[in-house]
Structure formats: C-alpha cells, structure tokens
Image (cartoon, rainbow, N blue to C red):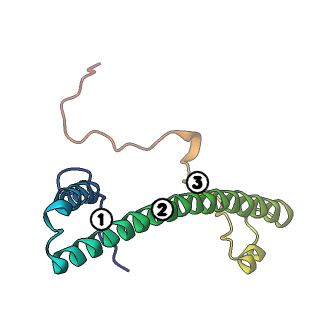
Amino acid sequence: MTTQPQKRRRNGPNSMGEKLSSWEALSTRAKPHLADNPQATADQAAFDTLIAEIKLANAEQDGLTAKLRDSVHSRQAMQKEGRRMHNHLISHLRSKLGPDSELLREFGIKPLAGRTRRKSTAGGQPTTPPPSGGPELHKP
C-alpha cells in the first residue's frame, strides 16, 4: 500500500477563507449595481446562497476534523494499552513455561535462544602464534 502525500490546508493567499472574504465583499458591493438587472440579481442571490453553504460545509468539516483527531488519539491510547497487555501476557507465559520452552511457539512467541559462548582455550590464555623469523629482542 502506497501512501499519498497529505494535502495541507492553505492559509496564505488564495486560501478558502480569503476567497470567501473576497466573494462576500464582491457580493455586498455588487448588490446596489445589480438592482436593475433581474438575471444578475438572481445570479447574485444564488452566489450568496452558495457562500452560505460553503461556510456551513467548512464548519461541518472543522467539526469532523476535530472528531477525527479525537478518534485517532483514542485509538493510539488503546493501541498503547494493547501493546502493554500483550507484553504482560507474554511475560506470564514465559514465566510459567520457561523463557526457552518450545511450547511458547504454540502462542506465536519465539523462545529465547540460549547464549552460546565461545570455547575458551586451556588456562583462559588466548593462543598467539610465535613470532616468525624476526630479530630476537632478548639475547642471553
């Protein structure tokens, strides 16, 4: 599933808020000049109705955005609690069955692998090869 970039709300020039403001200003200023033209008056009234509908849609969208934000926050809190409970149940099963028990696989839990240690040489001394053909430092 690919994610698409999220569209941002514009707050600068040509934002919906600024467009609505300029549309309202145009409607208010045009009313006195359109009184003698019945078709223009009808268009202006439809324009006013559309502006009101856009404002209502914006208010509805703002309410839904807030509801979505609350819903996302609530879901994230539930997921956090779910992860905590999941880990808690795994701890109980590991405690009861043993951390490296193969029975854990029945629950979808990987058993913890035991740590493997390197074999140590006798006496705990690492073996180093003797110097090869170099000059002796200690002469008797």
Contact? badges 3 and 1 (CB < 8 Å): no
Name which residue lies at 78% across and 76% down.
103
- Which is in the foreground here, disc 2 or disc 1? 2
x and y, in percent, of residue 88 in the image: 76, 58
Which circle marks residue 7 in the picture?
1
Describe the element under mark 1 as helix, strand or loop: loop
Residue extending farthest to the right is 96
- Find the distance from the CA under tag 2 to the CA under tag 1: 14 Å
Task: Name the residue carrying label 2.
Answer: 65
Where is residue 85, by image quadrant?
Answer: bottom right
Contact? badges 2 and 1 (CB < 8 Å): no
- Find the distance from the CA under tag 3 to the CA under tag 1: 54 Å
The disc labelled 3 sits on which kind of residue? Arg
Which circle marks residue 117 in the picture?
3
- Which is in the foreground here, disc 3 or disc 2? 2
Where is residue 100, by image quadrant?
Answer: bottom right
Q: Number of numbered discs present?
A: 3
How many residues crowd mark 2 within 10 Å: few (<14), some (14–19), many (20+)?
few
Contact? badges 3 and 2 (CB < 8 Å): no
Describe the element under mark 2 as helix, strand or loop: helix
